[in-house]
Amino acid sequence: MGKLDGKVAIVTGAASGIGRATAALFAAEGAKVVAADWSDAEGTKAVEAITASGGAAVFVRVDVSQPDDVQAMIRKAVDLYGGVDVIFNNAGVEGEQAITADCSLENWDRVININLKGVFLGMKYALPEMLKRGGGSIINNASVAGIVGFRSIPAYCASKGGVIQLTKAAALEYAAQGIRVNAICPGVIWTPMVERFVGDNAEARKAFEAMEPVGRFGSPEEVARMALFLASDDSSFCTGAPFVVDGGFVAA
């Protein structure tokens, strides 16, 4: 028996990193997965890997900042699998690096639209379907950057802080209706996003690793296991909380 047997789960940003690892784990635990991303090629590969392992999954192309795309993603889950039980609003971008006065309006709008508006839209359109099922679990991917500040990524910090507060508001609104809403706050996880920061610079990699008290990067799979906990009945008394997966970063 899998922890998500009989569940229908949507994962955004499923083509790589944390989203890809979570989509694979959800499917391995019995969920029917809608893997959503704006990368057709990598999203299709992620689904092919799931189905090759015996899981059930379908790829949907989506720009999470666009209401029509998000509604189509929800409809795909309903039409193909009968409803929505879990949504992991994971898609996000880091944006450009610049201090606040130099942050371009274009960068601000892009990061907020994907990281914060995208989470809002995922919840907005998934919630009515979850209410029809009598409950569900919403998981929003925030960041330790929503808890502590980082120089040169003001839009990213603002978006992730907003995700945490949006999570708390929705959790209070829907707690009595059987819908749990939680956030995950990853630390420095070895994903394509972090790879873009580090590049081939060995010293930069050491500096990032040194930020973590445990002395290493986290893995996408470690965050996926937290997402599984929050998606499953194991977390039945958990709602409105930011769950930190950071190797001790915010404790330092």
Image: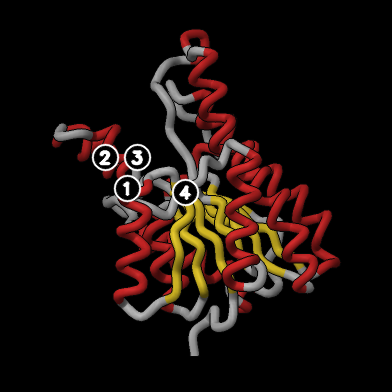
Q: How far apart are marks 1 and 2 (CA)?
A: 6 Å
Outermost residue to the bottom: 1
Task: Give whichever of discs 4 and 2 has the lower sequence position.
Answer: 4
> Which residue is nearer to you in this view: 150 or 127?
127
Please provide percent x and percent y for residue 113.
Answer: 58, 31
Q: Residues within 10 Å of mark 2 (few under 14, many from 20)?
A: few
Color encoding of the figure: secondary structure
- Label of residue 193 in the image: 3
Amino acid at pointer 2: Glu
> Is residue 109 shown left or right of residue 177?
left
Q: Residue at x 49, y 20 (%)?
A: 107
**Label 2 near label 4: C-beta < 8 Å?**
no
Q: Tell me the SS state at disc 3.
A: helix
1 or 4: mark nearer the eye: 4
**Label 3 near label 1: C-beta < 8 Å?**
yes
Q: Tell me the SS state at disc 1.
A: loop
Please provide percent x and percent y for residue 132.
Answer: 79, 69
The residue that mark 1 highlights is 191
Amino acid at pointer 4: Arg
Q: Which residue is drawn at 21% across and 39% down?
A: 205
**Label 3 near label 2: C-beta < 8 Å?**
yes
Amino acid at pointer 1: Thr
Please provide percent x and percent y for residue 43.
Answer: 37, 54
> Is residue 200 shown left or right of residue 219?
left
- Label of residue 195 in the image: 2
